[in-house]
Every structure is written in structure tokens, then in C-alpha cells.
Amino acid sequence: MNKLVYSVYIIMPLILLWHSKFYGKGKFNDEFLSLEQTKALQGFLALCIMLHHIGQKTCASWLTPKTRIIHGLDLFEPMGFMYVAVFLFFNGYGVYKSFHSKDNYLKAFIKRRILPVVLALYTTTIIFFIARLILGEKMDGKLVFFYLTSIKLCNPNTWYVIVLPFFYLAFYLAFKFIKKDGLAVALVTAFVLLYMFGSCYLLHNDFWIRGEWWYNCVHLFPIGIIFAKFEKQIIAHLKKFYYIYLAIFVLGVYPAYRFSKFVLMFHGYYMEFLPDYPYHKMIGLTSEMLVTFVFTMAVLLVGMKLRIGNKFLAFMGSITLEFYLIHGIFVEMFDHQFCSVVKSPFPIKNVFLYVVLVFILGIPSAVLLKKLHTWILGLGKRNEDSKTKKIA
């Protein structure tokens, strides 16, 4: 029965390619960076991240005892940081393009870009907190405070929505107060790089910046901004030498990944027992920066020839953030332990059934969460409108 999980390697390509269009020789998908295309791709990647999280629970090498390991999702298990890298590229690309195409874009930037992410963080944190209480996790006042503030992650999959608002804030401040576009881009890039390499001085811990997954792919945020700034020149160059770059980056993903694994054998993130551990972490980080860059470029180059888009991907693209955050509660619920602290109520050994249940429960939960967020954010807007009418 567990062999059925291998069907994801047929189902996932079908989901991606359904109603897709391939552009032949001399033709390109000029809409590969459009909102419709990027949303569809992010919807697909959200499903990949779901499989990644289930893979961590079922076939990761660190699982003990080894008899717990059930193979099937092995391809997805190590690729989470690559998927998130693509998200971060589009985050950076999107804010820069919007800044230059929309009037007074920064005026409502915090409300439209930062607040929805922060709201999503805390609504899902509360949901996970309630689940932990119901399942019997013992908490003192200090732990309750840490959980509800997300200083200690109540929802273990929230690092992305914690760091993203800070990158957005850096963008907002740089482009609000610096008139020279190039200098503003440089400052945002410097901020992200400082965060990345500064994080190498921190030890693994139970709080913010817990480990390398908090920073090993975030350089794609400024890369997205830089790509947007020089988009015309970059795309023209890529088109001119398209098949050369396609071969380099698509065929280069696996060698780059294997190279990073080799580097990490000698310069790993866990060499914190050495006095010069930041040096080792920085080298390991650099190797993983290469992996995520190569993977993201491979995705973009394929997108230049392949237009994706169907009703399901459009739907997934509309609930990506919510699905990313809420599906994890079902991943934990069907594992043998909930967030590694209390016994899960419904442990499932069949990986295919595990995937199906996380998916069919995650989708409606994400839809409801989206409706909640829309209602809360809309409530604030209606209050502002009513105040404006009273003043008038």
C-alpha cells in the first residue's frame, strides 16, 4: 500500500502541465513573470512544500528508530529551502516592479504587504497553540508567552513569515528615504546579506534564527529585486543564449546540490564545538546559496518556454500563504508526535494516506483562514472609510 505514494511523481507533473503551453523554437513565454504565472507556480510549490514536510516525517535520514523510515517522498525531503527560494525571488521581484509601476505604492505598503503576513503568522500561531493545549502539552507562563509571541515557534513552519516582514520593511525604508534607485537596491541587498552572514555567529537554538534554514535561501529576495531592475537586459541576454543557459542551470541543479552536501561534510552548520564555527557556517552557507540560485534560475528558464496555468493552480495561488502555514497542523497531527512534544492523536503509517489526508484537510482550512484574514483586513478598511465619511 505504501508504494502508492510514488504516484505523486505522476500526479505532480500532471497538475503542473494541465492546460500548459509550450513555446517552440524562436518563441518565448513573455508572460513568465506575470502575476498569473507566478501565482500559479507558487500554488504548485506550496504543494511541493507540503510533500517536503511530510517527507521530513517519513523518510528523513535523522529519523529514529530507522524502522520508522518509509521511502517514497525522498526527492521532496531535502528540497524545501529550494522551493522557498523561488517564493523569495518573487517577493523581491514583485515589490520592486510594483514600486515602479503603481502610484504612491509605498503609502499603503505596510498595510498591504507587511500586515497580511504578520496577521497570517499570528492566526496560525493561535491555532497551533490551542491544539497544543488540547493535546496536553505542559506549559508554564514563560512558555505561553514565548509561544503566543512566536519568539518560540508554536507553528514550526513559520520562519519564512517571520523574516519576510523584516525584508519588506528594509525595502520600504530604503525606497522611501533614498532617492537613488541603485543605492536603495544596494542597501536592501546589504541588509539581507548582513542578516545571512551575521546569523552564522548564532548557535542552533529554540528561538528565532534557530538554524540554517532561516537564512540559507533568503538572498533570493534581493536577487529578485536586482532581476526586476535589470529585467529587460537580463531577459534579452537569456533569450540570445537560451539553450546554453537552460542546459547549464537545469542540468546544474543536482551537481550543485551534491557539491553543497560535499562542502557541508567539512564546513557544516553543526560544527559549533569549534572556536571558528562561524567561518565553517559561512562556507557551508555559500555552497547552499549556489544551490538555491541555480534552482531558481532553472525554474525561470523553464518558465520562459512553458506557460502554466489551470483552474486548480489559480485556486492554489490564491491561498498559497494560508496553505503554507496551516497544512502543517495536519502534518503534525498524523505524525507519531505533535511538534515532537506530545503524542499525536491520529498517527498514520501509510504515507499515501498521510499525503491525501493532509491535502484534503489543508485545502478547506486554508480557504477558511483566507476568509478570516480577508474579513479582518477588510474590517479595518471599513472602519477607516466610516471615519472618512464622518470627517467629510
Image: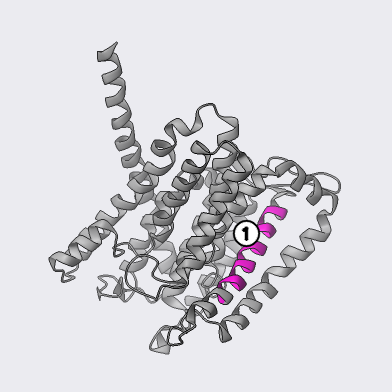
x and y, in percent, of residue 217 in the image: 54, 63
Q: Is residue 63 above or below residue 79?
A: below
Name the magenta segment's main secondary structure. Answer: helix
Q: Residue at x 65, y 44 (%)?
A: 228
The quarter of the picture where residue 231 lies is top right
> Magenta span covers which residues?
284-301
In depth, the one of 363 and 78 nearer the eye is 78
Q: Residue furthest left?
A: 141
- On the image, the x and y values in percent for residue 252 come to 72, 69
Q: Secondary structure at mark 1?
A: helix
Is residue 285 toward the left or the right of residue 115 in the image? right
Relative depth, front residue between 231 and 66: 231
The answer to if 288 sits in the magenta stretch is yes
Residue 104 x/y as whole percent: 50, 28
Q: Which residue is mark 1?
A: 13
State left or right for residue 177 relative to residue 361.
right
Using the rendered image of the protein, determine whether residue 310 is visible from the camera's viewpoint: no
Q: Nearer the viewer, residue 321 or 198?
A: 198
Confirm whether residue 191 shows in the render.
yes
Q: Position of residue 43 (x, y in %)?
A: 52, 50
The image quadrant where one finds the C terminus is top left
Which residue shows up at 62% across the image and 59% down it?
13
Name the amino acid type tagged 1. Answer: Pro
Q: How is the rendered protein coloured? A: one colour
